[in-house]
Amino acid sequence: MKQTSQVGIIGAGPAGLLLAHMLHLEGIASVVLEQRSRADIEATIKAGVLEHPTAELLKQLGVGERMQREGYLHRGIELSFGGKRHRLDLEDLTDGKAITVYPQHEVIKDLVAAVLANGTRIEFGVDAVRLAALESDQPVIHYQRDGAAQELYCDFIAGCDGFHGPSRQAIPQALRQEHAKVYPSGWFGILCEAPPSSDELIYAQSDRGFVLVSTRSPTVQRLYFQCDPQDSVDNWSDDRIWAEFQQRLANQDGWQLKKGPIFQKGIIAMRSFICETMQYGRLFLAGDSAHIVPPTGAKGLNLAAGDVVLLSRALHSHYRRNQQDALDAYSATAIQRVWRGEHFSWWMTNMLHDFEGEDSITRRFRRSQLDYVVKSRPGAQSLAENYVGLPFDAWIN
Ligand SMILES: Cc1cc2nc3c(=O)[nH]c(=O)nc-3n(C[C@H](O)[C@H](O)[C@H](O)COP(=O)(O)OP(=O)(O)OC[C@H]3O[C@@H](n4cnc5c(N)ncnc54)[C@H](O)[C@@H]3O)c2cc1C
């Protein structure tokens, strides 16, 4: 069946849904194609830290009401190393900014509800998505739904289909410059039923490796420890997991991790990846389809939001003012903020993780960097400014 839309969006992750909602508010029609079911995307547990600009954006767009009610404003974070905890007062270091802890799947629920309520179509469970005629005035997305072939003709295609989606692959390889780094460690993540162990997130460095003490709600906690990415969750009994956390979080002030029944375990790999370019013909990439960060800096979803802000503005200029400049400059503009987030994520990862086979000088450099961050206000400010998120507009020349 042949259909048309101004913008065809592939992927109903944070990038695709946010874009659909922003385009609607600007009077631009879109259709979202998603391979998974609504129940599946609304239940996939991923990110949890929203930067200040992302949280403000959700509020401005009218989809921040539940986040404000149920999310947690964190005005600081703790760095733990050498047996001591050190608080960084984000609010003080950044002229009043903070982060919001609100799970990504709750953001997804809010966005799906808003997008459907404003009449934009999301087709769930689509299959065999293929992009064509990207250099023409009317690109097309071929796909299948319930076994029947479908075609969506549009003015523009937004590739918001994550790292493994087909959009990036539709850009000829010769035009893609891909930068990639795979880290020799992964994160072992658990969800457990327990009260929070701390009012704020704890980033802990130890000789046994990194730990992140995060939270989801007053009764559910999210904890990670650095692990071998090839390890299996089957090797880790609950007792062994708690013992590992305890050893890595041992400190001199008597603080104790609160334990509880573990109901989810998983291992995630860590990589840095950037695709230059983020556009080809009438295809524009946004979010994880163009770039991946290791999770240490909590930047993935937030970088996706930054891309979408630029892309929706560029499409607005095209449709409302008949101006192409912003669309033409989309990749060159967006990639500047992406590189900043990528560098920060790499820097946080290296400062907080010990990697196997490292020499003693690298370990001492890490400790010196941590000391500098907690003892020097400019050092702390640099971390805080990046962590709470640089303004979306800071990177528009
Ligand atoms: C454990 C973990 C913790 C994280 N913590 C944080 C954090 O605290 N803060 C933060 O900012 N980021 C964090 N991230 C990263 C963040 O989750 C991602 O960067 C974010 O999901 C990117 O959004 P996206 O919309 O670009 O891509 P995705 O969320 O990957 O969405 C892409 C969508 O496209 C769909 N799709 C794929 N292929 C196709 C196809 N062929 N046809 C149709 N649809 C398709 C997928 O099903 C998916 O729904 C974390 C990630 C993980 C795994």
Image (cartoon, rainbow, N blue to C red):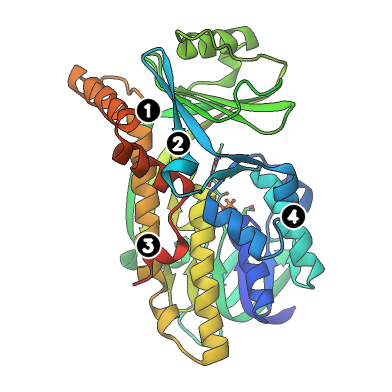
Label 2 vs label 1: CA separation?
8 Å
Question: Circle 4 is placed at which residue position?
Answer: 65
Give the secondary structure at mark 3: helix
The amino acid type found where label 1 is placed reads Leu
Mark closer to the observer (4, 2): 4
Res 352 label: 1
Residue 50 image offset from top left, x and y in percent: 57, 47
Residue 5 image offset from top left, x and y in percent: 67, 81
Image: 29 above or below 284: below
Instruction: Check if mark 3's residue and mark 4's residue have beta carbons within 8 Å.
Output: no
Image: 287 above or below 98: below
Mark toward the start of the polypeptide (1 vs 4): 4
Mark toward the start of the polypeptide (2 vs 1): 2
| Left or right for 29, reference 373 | right
The amino acid type found where label 3 is placed reads Ile
Residue 286 image offset from top left, x and y in percent: 50, 62
Image: 203 above or below 303: above
Give the secondary structure at mark 2: helix
Res 296 label: 2
Instruction: Check if mark 3's residue and mark 1's residue have beta carbons within 8 Å.
Output: no
Mark toward the start of the polypeptide (3 vs 4): 4
Mark 3 lies within 8 Å of ligand 1 (Cβ measured): no
The amino acid type found where label 4 is placed reads Glu
Q: Residue at x 68, y 51 (%)?
A: 107
Residue nearer the viewer, 328 or 94: 94
Question: Circle 3 is placed at which residue position?
Answer: 335
